Image (tube, grey):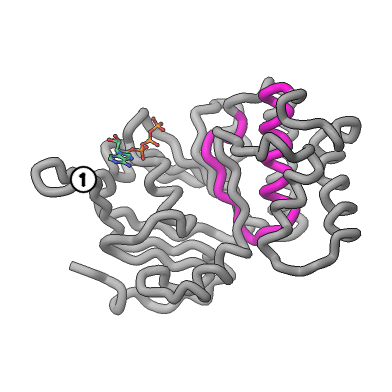
């Protein structure tokens, strides 16, 4: 069953992400396997939501479906009130501009400096304002404790520093929503705390919404909501 037409329109601002009746499969034929089962979830604007669960429970799959990085096969995912299934490329691009992504594999360009990597986070906005981009990139790197590393190449940065550059890149475009997959895995306690405090601050000051996959127990107490998945199903959903 598909539920696209039966889900009431969401204004999009109160719930930047609204998921209903979501199912997902991987593989073809005999190997076809369902990995997400009837997930329903509305994410409050400005909140920090954590997706938890054992390895293979479907956290990353759910995050990438919610973040428009994977095609919806069955069910409804609305981003800012816009149904992703059947959305035009133009609509998807407009939505992506409102999102920031932080992944465990930080995917920095090795030939670009820290500052240039962060500026890449602004290029998608398509405006040509290098001066402002540079200023914004330096500001974010400073907030991430990298004020003395602007011109370093990734090969001269530690794993934790690279991860913080990736966080700065995700946030520099002032996204409305941030999707993060294990953003603190490579970070020590101080750096991890800095990243989470930054996301919380953006939530409070700008209404930025964060959806994060993590195994990091230190973050749980900072979350507004913790959703636990097991075998592709939501087994616990608790507000903090
Ligand atoms: N591209 C893919 N092709 C086939 N199966 C996949 C693919 N990606 C994920 N899976 C399977 O889907 C299920 C859910 O995977 P997913 O990566 O979403 O889990 P996870 O909870 O994020 O795990 P982890 O904590 O280990 O990252 C697993 O059984 C996994 O093997």
Is residue 49 placed above or below 84 in the rendered structure?
Answer: above
* The CB of the residue at mark 1 lies under 8 Å from ligand 1: yes
Which residue appears at 83% of the width and 57% of the height?
Answer: 133
Residue 166 shown in magenta: yes
Horizontal relation, residue 101 to residue 65: left or right = right
Which residue appears at 52% of the width and 75% of the height?
Answer: 90
Toward which corner of the image does residue 132 lie, by quadrant? bottom right
Q: Which residue is mark 1?
A: 27
Residue 160 screen position, x and y as percent: 69, 25
The one nearer the camera, 194 or 8, is 194
The one nearer the camera, 159 or 184, is 159
Residue 186 shown in magenta: no
Q: Quadrant of the C terminus?
A: top right
Is residue 182 placed above or below 49 in the rendered structure?
Answer: above
Which residue appears at 74% of the width and 42% of the height?
Answer: 198
Residue 240 appears anywhere in the view: no
Q: Quadrant of ligand 1?
A: top left
The one nearer the camera, 213 or 129, is 129
Horizontal relation, residue 214 to residue 85: left or right = right
Residue 6 screen position, x and y as percent: 29, 77
Q: Secondary structure at mark 1?
A: loop
Q: Which residues are magenta?
A: 158-184
Residue furthest to the front in view is 111
Which residue appears at 26% of the width and 55% of the height?
Answer: 23
- Packing grade of label 1 (10 A; few <14, some 14-19, many >=20) is few
């Amino acid at each position: 069953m598909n539920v696209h037409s039966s889900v009431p329109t969401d204004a999009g601002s109160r719930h930047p992400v609204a998921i209903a009746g979501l199912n997902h499969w991987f593989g073809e034929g005999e190997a076809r396997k369902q990995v997400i089962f009837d997930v329903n979830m509305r994410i409050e604007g400005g909140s920090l939501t954590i997706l938890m669960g054992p390895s293979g429970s479907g956290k990353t799959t759910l995050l990438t479906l919610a973040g428009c990085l994977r095609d919806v096969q069955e069910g409804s995912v609305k981003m800012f009130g816009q149904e992703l299934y059947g959305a035009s490329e133009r609509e998807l691009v407009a939505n992506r501009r409102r999102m920031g992504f932080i992944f465990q594999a930080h995917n920095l360009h090795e030939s670009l400096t820290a500052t240039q990597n962060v500026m890449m986070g602004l290029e998608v906005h398509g405006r040509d304002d290098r001066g402002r981009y540079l200023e914004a990139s330096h500001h974010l790197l400073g907030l991430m404790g990298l004020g003395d590393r602007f011109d370093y190449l990734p090969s001269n940065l530690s794993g934790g520093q690279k991860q913080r550059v990736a966080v700065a890149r995700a946030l520099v475009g002032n996204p409305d929503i941030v999707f993060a997959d294990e953003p603190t895995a490579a970070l020590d306690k101080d750096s991890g705390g800095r990243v989470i405090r930054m996301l919380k601050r953006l939530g409070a000051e700008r209404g930025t919404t964060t959806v994060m996959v993590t195994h990091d127990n230190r973050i749980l107490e900072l979350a507004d909501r913790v959703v636990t998945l097991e075998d592709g199903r939501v087994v616990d959903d608790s507000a903090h």
